[in-house]
Image (tube, rainbow, N blue to C red):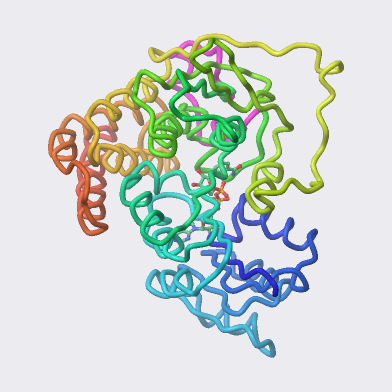
Amino acid sequence: MRRRVSILGATGSVGQNTVGLLLAQGGAETYQVVALTGSGNVALLAEQARALSAEVAVTADPGRLAELEAALAGSAIRAAAGPAALVEAAARPVDWAMSAIVGAAGLAPGLALARHGGVLALANKESMVCAGELMRRTCAAHGTRLLPADSEHSAIFQVLRGESAGEVERVILTASGGPFRDWPARRMAEVTPKQARAHPNWDMGERISIDSATMFNKALEVIEARELFGLRPEQIEVVVHPQSVVHSMVEFRDGSIVAQLGPSDMRAVIGFALNWPERRALPVPRLDLARLGRLDFSPADPERFPALRLAGQVLELGGLAGTVFNAAKEAALGAFLIHAIGFLDMAVLVEHVLESLGPEAAACGSGYDLDAVMALDAEARRLGGLWVEAFSGK
Ligand code: NAD
Ligand code: MG
């Protein structure tokens, strides 16, 4: 029996790497590909769906249905479009799924994937940040195994294999520090989206690359780590490690620190989740430590990178504070991308929105549903939009 698999966000950076690995491991002969989804890049989506003989291809953009249908003409692949079709496709039963849509848009379809009872490889960290407890609850109710597809969390997961969670003292998330690691704040004020997009070590989508430059990505990952591994705020530390070779570490109560090292190549992370619980040969470069010569570590600076300080506030607030944080961050990033606000304004904006909605979000506690998350997400975006107007002097 071929393993049934789906990939949400197949046309993105993580999605394309996942498609590549499926093809390298036998493609349609090994896997029965159920659903592939994308958004703007319909030609690529159709090409992927043909290469893997997918059952259905869905674009999130309803205006592109005709284009997708035309690109799939003559094949047996069904085309669909729009957010509802996306959730419907995600609900088709599979044994393994990759959740790799960017942003909170990945939450509703990700929840549908969590109901399959197979393996859910999670690159869409925003769904854990926005609604970690709901994701965990849904996975638990359906016997779904959640595997992180984020390099730091995959590292922690790999280190914890065979260990007992009660013996963990803390986890140490490594951060490259992004392109502005050593820049003074006043220099960062002038940064353009083009400069912020250029990550020194990883080749990733535009949004996560800019989030790495502000360290909002690390802030999201701190919250993601709490949600995935059930940690207390004081058990999570961030350390800057410019080489991105040590992907993260766990310190145990006997003082031992165990690290996972590897190339800065997402295929290693995705391949681990794809083949789990086995390890198979993967088409990734190998590390040559002697040639590398050194690994550097330094403290993270929450003064120059306030996103890290705000992540601490989100952990302390609990409830749905992560929803507000992520939605405000997405609004700020969208405004930065169109040059409406500056690089440093992003964190200021998020802080304002968190100040306004934090208490309400904290009061949501646990046991909330998707509607509550989406309502708060919308409210945070609305407030974020008002701050964008205020910042840009409109
Ligand atoms: P990307 O921008 O390259 O791709 C995003 C995908 O989501 C595309 O397929 C796009 O079509 C789809 N998409 C965009 N907006 C959508 C919407 N509104 N509705 C439905 N689909 C939509 O992003 P990426 O870099 O591949 O990142 C994907 C996720 O994985 C993010 O959550 C990111 O934080 C996480 N992640 C990425 C990397 C990486 O190396 N790129 C590493 C770790 C985690
Ligand atoms: Mg990461």
Q: Residue 84, image x and y in percent?
A: 37, 73
- Along the horizontal axis of the image, is 265 left or right of 96? right
Q: Residue 77, image x and y in percent?
A: 62, 83
Q: Residue 334, image x and y in percent?
A: 39, 44
Tell me, yes or no, whether the highlighted magenta stretch contains residue 318.
Answer: no
Q: Nearer the viewer, residue 8 or 91?
A: 91
- Along the horizontal axis of the image, is 201 left or right of 196? right
Q: Nearer the viewer, residue 147 or 301?
A: 147
**Number of numbered discs visible in the structure rendering:** 0
Kindly identify the residue that appears in the image at 38 percent across and 28 percent down. 231
Q: Residue 255, image x and y in percent?
A: 54, 10
Kindly identify the residue that appears in the image at 41 percent across and 55 percent down. 139
Vertical comparison of 378 with 246: above or below: below
Vertical comparison of 320 with 254: above or below: below
Kindly identify the residue that appears in the image at 25 percent across and 55 percent down. 374
Kindly identify the residue that appears in the image at 21 percent across and 50 percent down. 367
Vertical comparison of 81 with 95: above or below: below
Residue 315, quarter of picture: top left
* Residue extent of the magenta highlight: 179-200
Q: Nearer the viewer, residue 235 or 106?
A: 235
Quarter placement of the C terminus: top left
Q: Nearer the viewer, residue 270 or 45?
A: 270
Tell me, yes or no, whether the highlighted magenta stretch contains residue 181.
Answer: yes
Quarter placement of the N terminus: bottom right
